[in-house]
Amino acid sequence: MDPLKSITKNEIKEAIKSKLSRYFNTTPTDASENQIYKATVLTVKDILTSMRAEYKKDIKKSEGKRVVYLCMEFLLGRSLQVNLTNLGIVDEYRSALREMGFSLDHLYELEPDPSLGNGGLGRLAACFMDSLSALGYPANGYSICYEYGLFRQKIVDGEQIELPDVWLPDGECWLVPRTDKTYIVRFDGHITENWRGGHCDIIHENYTEVQAVPYDLMISGAGSRAVNTLRLWRARGTNQNFNMKLFSQGEYIRAMQQNTSAEIISKVLYPSDEHTEGKLLRLTQQYFLVSASLQSVIADHFALYGTLNNFADKVAIHINDTHPALCIPELMRILLDVYSYSWEDAWNIVTRTISYTNHTVMPEALETWNEDLFRLKLPRIYMIICEINRRLGEELWRAYPGDWERISQMSVISHSQIRMANLSVYASHKVNGVSELHTQILKDTVFHNSYKYTPEKFINITNGIAHRRWLCCANPELATLLDETIGPEYRYDSERLSDFAKYSNDKNIHERLSEIKQHNKERFAEYYYLKTGIALNTHSIFDVHVKRIHEYKRQLLGALKIIAYYNELKENPNSSLPPHTFIFGGKAAPGYYIAKDIINLICGISKELEHDPRLRERMRVIFIEDYKVSTAEILMPASDISEQISLAGKEASGTGCMKFMINGALTVGTLDGANVEMRRAVGNDNIYIFGLRANEVEELWRRGYESIAYYNRSERLRRAVDALTTGFNGKQYTNIMHYLLLGHGVADPYMCLADFDSYTSVCRKAAIDYENKSLWYKKVVMNIAGAGYFSADRSIREYAEKIWGCKSIYGK
Ligand code: 26W
């Protein structure tokens, strides 16, 4: 890539030296690697800062619309390599550091991997920020600067232990503190309305206040002059909160108590994903995020235009799932109470500004808040939500007189619960699902009534990934092969990957791809060996199932397949199937006991196999501890098979599938989420699809799923399930056996046994195909060639055009 900023090796050396001297009072000869790392980051930050200053001028000139992307999670991954790559200055930094006696690749590894997200939703937000900058859309992400990200996972005797994830202070060097842009957020207290000549003053008394202090992270884009920011808010007590009187009386802890409770707001990311807990602190975090962000956005807008009348023309606010949906009543509050807009005018601005993406159909993930708890914490916001709900009710009554059932289903408050999804749908001008199938399911089920009422609101935008991070940075050898064959344009224009299809029968390319895969497997094996002392067989099939541990994602189905395979190998150790390494990774929410049992089972199988050196040559199971973005970056390029085996209809999209695909792993999957579109992109011969379709799942659910019938019908399955009671490594898993066969009322709602036979038979087919190198690599080529559509660049262009109505300021 052409450097955007011309900087020479010598200038880099000078810059690093000067940072070392200024911030660490040291020199390159005496500095530690960590100091070199930090000094290097500071120099990159300087480049980004000067680019951002230019970019801001360009934005101002363009007078275009900007995107405000609100999300409780941004799972960023590391920044150094991506920034240097985006700026086109990797080689210059590499040689400058080499001459100073340091390895750039080593420095990459020193960077903490900030886990400010749980999984797919947070990683998607990070991929989107990358594309927004690459394409030159003025955008700002807003989130919380959690002091502790998602817990660090340790596995002790097969059990998950959660430890705090400390990413600060080492991660802090990327952040720019903006204490000059601090805002105050108010909670609790009570509200009085004071009517004066047709106008109502709102008086909020006895509130508690919290300071929101912003820390900005600059986001570069490949080959782009745009540097957008991600603003992370940290909560601080205000001076009002420090009780001097108590302090003087020697009550130090009590004197500080209020500050501490303010700071708790940004202390830790909630580790629950796809399951809401209705906790007060979570509500507090959500309001803290939206109130601080909106105050900041409005202040910037007002400073520029001196009015909010054009707010909806200049700002598009996007809420990533319902977690930031309080920005709807908060924007109303500011417009009504601070800027004295009428309800109608304010609502008009709100509904033209806000749009919403839904990321899940799981009922337990649809957020609701207890009305009483809500009223106490956010009294003014509660009043506004009541009024929104009243007006919605009136509107619906006019449209559907007497249809109480429908009106109640669509209302924002019902059964003493505030429903964030209904609020988001009502207030947004566009609502999108994240894959074709998911959007259809939203229209047919979750939001069926709203869809009937306002069909034009609902659209699909299929997810995408930052292909430069996941291909160009994570798999440099493959990127080089692509540069040599199809030219480097695919780096900016992902659809050009389709040119690679013409090599599908080229034996030389197959050979090169297989060498690259082998190198990547060795790289992963080395990483794993250093961590665990276990040496993997890099000539085995790497069959990989990494994602959050969840019943619907069916790691359990994967485990059953492995047990069946194990049973088979015990009987026939000379089986002709190629050796396998089954790789699992992912975190379970701390209170999610079944998910933890599943981890335990996988670890049990793994341990048992470790004791059998002969079998271990043919199959091995590993559970990677603390799976996160930086692990994924080594693992995806090393994978042969990508497991995407959720029960059809449950995975909204999945994005891991796209990362595997672009790295040349073949998918074994159900027709769920984005797998449906992946199959279309690669053709049926180049993907291993199995199992019930979404409509068949529905039908089976209605008829009644009887797992025992499948158990009785298939001997392989029966023996696999029975093995749970015999146990692994001396431990029995009867609880899982009960879950699969008996359940509490209904056995396993995710129907693992129904898909077992078709799953194991496509896996066998994949293993046989793998032995036929030209057949396998032909499929690999077709997967890489088909991955262009799944770039976040394409998704972002669609959001810009279909939802936000904003343009790239560089005409990209
Ligand atoms: C409040 C509890 C909670 C927390 C997170 C509920 C729901 C969530 C997220 C919406 C869960 C999530 O990450 N969903 C995933 O979003 C990805 C990006 O669109 C999709 O690819 C995944 O299919 C979806 O599970």
Image (spheres, grey):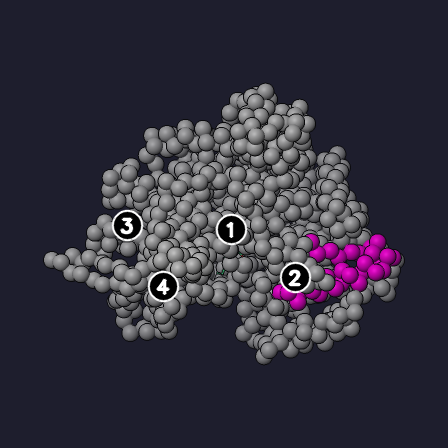
Marks 2 and 4 in Cβ contact (< 8 Å): no
Q: Residue at x 24, y 51 (%)?
A: 338
Q: Amino acid at mark 3?
A: Ile
Left or right: where 798 falls relative to 530: left
Mark toward the viewer: 3 or 1: 1
> Which comes sooner in the sequence, label 4 or label 3?
3
Residue corresponding to mark 2: 160
Instruction: Tell me: is circle 2 under 8 Å from ligand 1.
Output: no
Mark toward the viewer: 4 or 3: 4
Left or right: where 682 falls relative to 436: right
Residue corresponding to mark 1: 147
Q: Quadrant of the N terminus?
A: top right
Find residue 377 and name its label. Answer: 4
**Crowding near the residue tagged with mark 4, few <14, some 14–19, many ≥20 C-alpha atoms within 10 Å:** many
Find residue 349 and name its label. Answer: 3
- In space, the residues marked 2 and 3 are separated at their CA atoms by 47 Å
